[in-house]
Amino acid sequence: MHAPARPMTFTLMFALFAASAAVSAQDQAPTMDEMLTKVAAALPDKAPAIPQAARRLLVFTLTKGYRHSSIPIGAEALKRMGEKTGAYQTEISEDVNLFKPESLKRFDAVLMLSTTGELFDDPAMRQAVLDFVRSGRGWIGIHAATDCFYQWPDYGEMIGGYFDGHPWHEKVGIKIDDAKHPVNAVFAGNPFEIVDEIYQFKYPYARSKLHVLTSLDVTRTAMKKDGIHRADADFAVSWVRGYGNGRVFNCSLGHREEIYWNPTVLRHYLAGIQFAFGDLPAESAPSLQTTPGWTRLFNGKDLAGWKGLVADPPARAKMSAAELKSAQVTADESMRAHWKVENGVLAFDGQGSHLCTARDYGDFEMLVDWKIEPGGDSGIYLRGSPQVQIWDPAQWPQGSGGLYNNEKNPKDPLAVADHSVGQWNTFHIQMTGDRVTVALNDRLVVDNTVLENYWERGKPIYPSGQIELQSHGTKLWFRDIWIRQISSGNAGK
């Protein structure tokens, strides 16, 4: 949920829209000298933060797919911005050898400027990149930086998402998602309009992982366009995130040449670059953390809020309070023996029983990341009843996400949406009454289907109950588990 949009000031509207006015195909493109003159006039006089040390930035421009004509002026604008403000010195390159560990360590941050395609596949260099950011360095993406390394899922995880088309190349509305964020200071909280090519993003893009700064204002943008894939109308434009001890800033503006002499956008870039360096302290917690109603089910540190499994719902209902308390102590001991937190991830060793929420839920919306090994088998029990299925599609070709234990209502997923075994997947589950909707990796796999009561087939699903991460004799990993209670009338304690 976002604050109501405030009217845009005339000065900001002129700076953003006039600098981004559409250039018709018949207009003569400006020369590099003419563009550099425009850039010089648009560069900020100073950086928003004083560098903590002399900073060195690698601006990388290699493309193995589409090549943007704006790359040369973009690289020069970024270089000259660092020089004029004293924020950093720049090396512009397309040499992949700079990603070898001994070369990469010369830089404080890397900026991927409209890079496309599979730029390199050397495992050592890929690991060097991840280690570089995790160790405390910065990573910056401008425009097409999410349109590369599709065969390297860790890159998508790090930068925050992958390009999934650009339905818009026209005047669009942009809203400010966090008006108080230092990287957004240039906007002064005011939404704006701009002409550029606007991206949509696919997995692993999620507000449960990213701190979104700006996004498409769908109320001020044409939304009847071909190629719009996201049903949630969530089209981020810029974001930040933490990654290990490092920092990531991504902004998809930058397709058009004139973006690089837009003074407002340049200042947004500069603040994001300084955030990535660590010179501009700013919040990077996921946006969902400050979205009303959403809470973390897993804190990334310990098993607080979770308990071991005691029997099934009908059996628990027959226990006395003393019997249930004693059984819970035993179940919790088993839980702690087999469920651990490792590097922020819930890990199950393949033995023992389910992990259960300490409280019950009625109607809710849930996000959960999961990963399995070959042959893996698991699921998410809703209100204590099985289940949204998780398994290896190599053995169960229908794929994950279906309501496996249904007998009368549909049980199989609508599509196979699993990532390769060993990679992370995300469920978005909504349960209202007895009806369940599931999206797996942004694809709808269960559409408002009744979940049957597995334990007592003649009865409807229980109005409230615990959520369980199913154990089924294989190793499992879960992370980024969030929940939003939809209504409280049927929630348990």
Image (cartoon, rainbow, N blue to C red):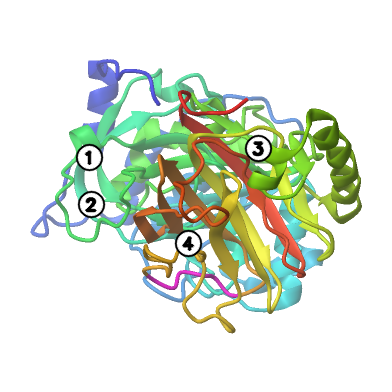
Q: Which residues are magenta?
A: 415-420
Q: Which quadrant of the view contains residue 153? A: bottom right
Q: Is tag 4's residue or tag 3's residue first in the polypeptide sequence? A: 3
Find residue 372 and name its label.
Answer: none
Q: Residue at x 24, y 25 (%)?
A: 13
Report which residue position mark 1 lands on.
172
SS for callout 1: strand
Please give the residue where the numbered disc 4 appears in the rendered image: 403
Q: Are marks 2 and 1 in contact (CB under 8 Å)?
A: yes
Residue 91 in view (yes/no): no
Q: Secondary structure at mark 4?
A: loop
The residue that disc 2 covers is: 168
223 versus 361 height, above or below: below
Q: Which kind of residue does numbered mark 1 sit on? A: Val
Examine the rendered structure and indicate whether residue 217 appears above or below residue 35. Answer: above
Q: Kindly identify which residue carries mark 3.
A: 297
Please indicate whether residue 376 sits to the left or right of residue 101 in the image. Answer: left
Q: Nearer the viewer, residue 456 or 191?
A: 456
